[in-house]
Image (tube, grey):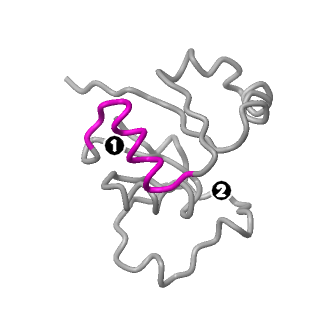
Amino acid sequence: MKCWRACSFVSGTACSIRSMFRRSVCRRPRRYFRAVEIVSEKSARTYASIMTRHQVEPTRFLMVGNSLRSDILPVLEAGGTAVHIPYPTTWAHEHVAEEAMLGKVFTTLGSIRELSA
């Protein structure tokens, strides 16, 4: 039997993240996520620290995100697996050069609905 522990990892200030959750359909994140981690920067080191804190081996860590720069590449560098779900609008600082993507293996989906357990 598979056991998944869903956690939310977001970057920003605590105040801005609380505001974001209040404006979203997920008004009470603890109802859906075992943990909510607010970090100042999403980096391979940050993700490795999160994996250690939550006692998850990198090979069992799956990140689903919309940012190649902040969600996908750092998780791959930390040894995890990633699923990219592109968002139609991407901030300029989130763009990644094509050469940075060479050799990177991850899945891309069109919607979160395509993600299966």
Instruction: Look at the magenta stretch and give its main secondary structure.
Output: helix
Q: Which residues are magenta?
A: 42-57
Tag of residue 87: 2
Quadrant of residue 116 in the image?
top left
Quadrant of residue 105 in the image?
bottom left
Assign a secondary structure to mark 2. Answer: loop
Tag of residue 61: 1
Give the left or right position of residue 87, taking residue 106 as reference.
Answer: right
Q: Counting residues from the N terminus, which is met first, the one under dot 1 or under dot 2?
A: 1
Residue at image location 46% in from the left, 63% down from the top: 73
Residue closest to the eye, 44 or 91: 44
- Percent from the top left, x then y, of residue 23? 80, 29
Which quadrant holds the C terminus? top left
Mark 2: amino acid:
Tyr
Give the left or right position of residue 97, taking residue 73 as reference.
Answer: right
- Percent from the top left, x then y, of residue 4? 34, 28
Residue at image location 36% in from the left, 39% down from the top: 51
Spatial CA distance of label 1 from label 2 is: 22 Å
Is 24 in the magenta?
no
Is 55 in the magenta?
yes
Which quadrant holds the N terminus? top left
Q: Farthest residue to the bottom: give it.
A: 99
